[in-house]
Image (cartoon, coloured by chain):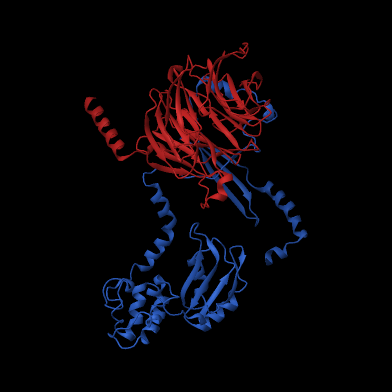
Amino acid sequence: MAAQAKHDWADDEDLDETTQTTADLPPPQKINNKDGSTTIIEYRLNDNGQKVKTTRRIRFITHREVVNPRVAERKSWSKFGLSAKDGNGPAPDTTSVGENIIFKPSVNWRKDAKDEGKDPNAQAMKDKLKDKKVKCRICNGEHFTARCPYKDTMAPIGEAGAAADVAAGMGDDGAGEAAGVGAAGAGKKGSYVPPALRGNRAGGAAGESMGGSKYGERDDLATLRVTNVSEMAEEGELRDMFERFGRVTRVFLAKDRDTGLAKGFAFISFADRSDAVKACQKMDGWGFKHLILRVEFAKKTA
Amino acid sequence: MRPILLSGHERALTQVKYNRDGDLIFSVSKDQQICVWFAHNGERLGTYHGHVGAIWTIDIDPTSTIMASGSADNTIRLWDIKTGKNLKTWEFPTAVKRVEFNEDGTKLLGVTEKRMGHLGTIVVLDIKVDVEAEQSDEKALTIVCDESKATVAGWSYLSKFIIAGHEDGSVSQYDAKSGDLLYNIAIHELDCPITDLQWSQDRTYFITASKDKSAKLVTAKDLEILKTYVSDTPLNSATITPKKDFVILGGGQAAMDVTRTSARQGKFEARFYHKIFEDEIGRVRGHFGPLNTVAAEPTGKGYCSGGEDGYVRVHQFDKGYFDFMYEVERERQNRLNQQQQSTA
């Protein structure tokens, strides 16, 4: 902006000078190479007044195409009707070139098309999880906690250590934090706790797949409601934006089931309420993808 | 591939057609004009004026000298392709929905609409493929379709039969000389009109498209269904690609039906199926309305499609299209290559 503001009509005079100086530039050169190609060297001044040398090597290849004589004859026909006044070559008002389409027939094109859509996300996730091992925080087995066969009968082992293990297990720092806090309140280890009472623990991991609202409430104190989100938004983008203010435990972007486009609102949960306050202040009115975000604290659902 | 967009029409396209050599594309639409384009760069050669109603159909004689068009103004007109001159006009009591030249261009059939007390008919006209010649006024033959009106029709190999597709989803075979009905077979679901009928290069079999969301490959001799291609949308057009064993289907939810269906996406894509294995092998996006017509280039290098959106899109296939082969096809090719090497 500053550079633009400085621009002044008076500066325009400089242009005349530069056009004069082009006369000082060395004349363009043309060299015929031994291999049949031509080297063209040209000089010009760029916007900063610096001399730029452009060297191009060009080879002319005559491409011969055999055309049916009938077709060749028709190419010489004169135009008529509405096109009678058009010059040679396609007229821009009737003919244009569309955007490139990649069409590759394939037996399982349907699957390919889907993979392509998923790919960037899947790849990023893979990279993230590359050096992390899956570890169940209930039985320490090599599976996700949500998949643990003892999920309903055992409480997580090692309350203090759990948080760290879980962080590794989920590959998602935020979820681990929430679960760790919940584990402390889960009561005596080994004793049966009905799922309804295990609600807090479920907040991060298992609860997500089961629909968190049923199993205990989320910590709405540190949850922001973001509205006026662009259709093209992705959860990852939102996470990146909000992670600057602190640890984000959950990002939920409402998406249309049929089209996969965002519906225009999202919830961002922070681990810490103070981070959420900071984010709310900073991000309210933030421009994101042609729209201005509106950020406020989520209201508790009735 | 980069499609070429032809925007010479102001209303929905009704038919696009290549000439026999594949260098010219003819397009007709409801806006009462005919456009002819060069296929290689999309340059418009000219327009033909004279019709005073929506034009439903067009066909080009095999030598690309004259062209016939059928319109809702109840006429078939014959045109000089080179100059755009209207050579001859035949009047009919109702709209003309389909015209087609036979293999040598000496006969032209026209399908007329059933309306205002008139039954649908298929008429045959004798044509002299000469710009100067006087064309006869007389109809060589009239076939009356009293059961279900014909929507599309075409000439079989050697101009032996006239094959017609009907509104009730059946196809009939008529003797092209006498006009006698030989067979009538229901191949599509009842009361799903046949929307298109296009021939293989040798005219021994043809493909039909229907509103029942399927296309069928049928023999001309005994109307035997060879293949069925099932899609998920009503079809408006189907064509057989030369060179590669594919078929291209075009369709989409009609604008008037959109509010009655749950599908949000209109499925406005050209669908490619393998002609023999009946699998869908790909789609080409681009139109933002249903595809009303598709045509394959006679040399097999490309295809074009005309949509309800008023655009014609001309596509030239990439290498990937020509390289595509099923595993069994590839094995066979390898075997043949080996045999050739061993004999050499």
In depth, the one of B221 and B157 nearer the eye is B221
Residue A175 % position (x, y): 41, 76
Residue A256 horizontal side relative to residue B13, left or right: left
Residue A65 % position (x, y): 49, 27
Q: Is residue A178 above or below residue B302?
A: below
Q: Residue at x 52, y 60 (%)?
A: A261
Residue A5 horizontal side relative to residue A186, left or right: right
Q: Residue at x 57, y 63 (%)?
A: A230
In this view of the protein, can residue B292 be seen by the observer?
yes
Residue A244 % position (x, y): 51, 75
Residue A43 horizontal side relative to residue A39, left or right: right
Quarter of the view holding residue A206: bottom left
In depth, the one of A84 and A3 nearer the eye is A84
In this view of the protein, can residue B129 be seen by the observer?
no
* Chain A colour in the picture: blue
Q: Is residue B284 above or below residue A80?
A: below
Residue A142 % position (x, y): 27, 71
Quarter of the view holding residue B110: top right
* Chain B colour in the picture: red
Residue projecting furthest to the right: A10
In depth, the one of A279 and B226 nearer the eye is B226
Q: Is residue A273 above or below residue B12?
A: below
In depth, the one of A17 and B226 nearer the eye is B226
